[in-house]
Amino acid sequence: MSTSQPPVPEGPPRPERTPSSAGETPAPAAGVPSTAAGVPSQPLPADARGPAGGPRPVPVEVPRSADGHPAPPEDPASAHGSRPPASLSPSRASDFMQCPLLYRFRVIDRLPEKPSEAATRGTLVHAVLERLFDAPAAERTPPRARALIPGQWDRLLEARPELAGLFAQDEDGERLARWMSEAEALVERWFSLEDPTRLEPAERELFVETELESGLRLRGVIDRVDVAPTGEVRIVDYKTGKAPRPEYSEGALFQMKFYALVVWRLKGVVPRRLQLVYLGSGEVLTYDPVPADLERVERKLLALWDAIVRATETGDWRPRPTKLCGWCDHQARCPEFGGTPPVYPLPVVPAG
Ligand code: SF4
C-alpha cells in the first residue's frame, strides 16, 4: 500500500447518503477504490492486521450488538475476572457515552447478556456477506448468498451453542423460519446497494489494533477494507438496521472515524472513504474524512478514556437513563430501576 496521502476535498466534508437504487453502486469519489471489474484490491500490510500480524483472522462468529457493532477479540489483559479496562473499541466507547454504568457492567463486572434475535441475525448476515467473497467473482450472486445462510447458521450454533436457546420455545419452527427469511431479505437487499461481482476486498473482518502516544490502545474489527492499486483505502461497514436520520448520522460515523484513526495511526494513510451500508433501509452513507476529523476523534477518545480511568479508580459509575434503557439487559441491577449493582470488584482509590 502506498504511504502517500490521497487528495482530500476542500473544507469539512459532509456525510452523503445514497438511497437504494437497484443494481447501482454508489459512485466513488476520485481516488476511491473502484468497483470496476479487474481492479483488484490489495491486502493491507501485515502490521495492519493486529498485534501478531500473520494471516487475517476470520471469526465467523464475531459477536455483534443489535446495531451491528462487531466486538473485537477478547483483550488478553482483561480476559479473566474483573480487571481495569485496558483498551477501547468503538462499541465500548459508545457504551460509556450512552451510560457509564452500562460500561461498568459490561467491561468490569463482565455480566452475561442474553443473545438477541436481532444481534444474532446481524452476525449471521455479516458471516454470509464475508464468506460470499470466497467464491469467484462471477458466482457472487443472490442465490449463492442465500444458499450460504443455513451453513453459516450451523457454524454459528457450533461456535456459540447458547444461541440455540433463542428458538428453544419455537416448537413448530415458525419463528426460526421467519427469522431466517428476514436474514435472507437483508442479504438480498445488499445486492441492490453493492455489486460483489465487481469488488475484490483487500480484507474482510479485519482485526486492527494500535496504541496512541498516550498509551491508550484502540482496537476493533472492520467488516471490509477495499484498497485501490494506487493505495486509497475505503473502509466499509454493514449494518443490518436502518440508516439513522441525518441529524443522528454523526453518531453512526463515530465508529467509522474510530477505525479510520486506527488505520491512519497504523499506516500513516487517511482512508479515502468511509462507507456504511444499511441493509435494513437500503441506504449507503458515505463520508470522506480529512486528518482534522480524525484528530478530533482522537481528542474525544482521550477525553473519554480519562473519564473511564477516573470512574475505574473511584468506582463512581453513574447510570444515565435514556430510552435505550429499554434494550439494556441490566435493569434489575440498575439503581434507576430500583436495582443494586454488584459489589464493585476493583480497589477504589480514596479521593485525595
Ligand atoms: S438500565 Fe439504563 S441507566 Fe441502567 S445501566 Fe442500563 S442503560 Fe444504564
Image (cartoon, grey):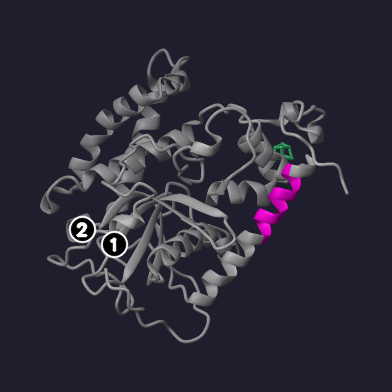
* Residue at (70% x, 55% y) in the render: 306
Q: Residue furthest bottom?
A: 10
Q: Considering only vertical position in the picture, is 151 above or below 210?
A: above
Provide the residue span drawn in magenta: 303-312
How packed is label 2: few (under 14 Cα within 10 Å), some, or many (20 or more)?
A: many
- Label 2 sits on a secondary structure element that is loop
Q: Is residue 98 left or right of residue 12?
A: right
x and y percent of residue 35 in the render? 22, 66
Give the quarter of the image for residue 284.
bottom left
- Label 1 sits on a secondary structure element that is strand
Give whichever of discs 2 and 1 has the lower sequence position.
Answer: 2
| Tag of residue 246 | none
* Residue at (51% x, 28% y) in the render: 115
Dominant secondary structure, magenta: helix
**Quarter holding the N terminus?**
bottom left
Q: Which residue is mark 2?
A: 200
Residue 310 inside the magenta-drawn segment: yes
Q: Quadrant of ligand 1?
A: top right
Q: Which residue is mark 1?
A: 226
Q: Is residue 159 left or right of residue 54?
A: right
Q: Is residue 286 left or right of residue 228?
A: right
Residue 318 shows in the view = no
* Labelled pair 2, 1 in contact (Cβ < 8 Å): yes
x and y percent of residue 290 in the render? 47, 76
* Residue at (27% x, 29% y) in the render: 150
Marks 2 and 1, Cα distance to the nearest angstrom? 7 Å
x and y percent of residue 303 in the render? 68, 60
Q: Residue furthest right?
A: 352
Q: Amino acid at mark 1?
A: Asp
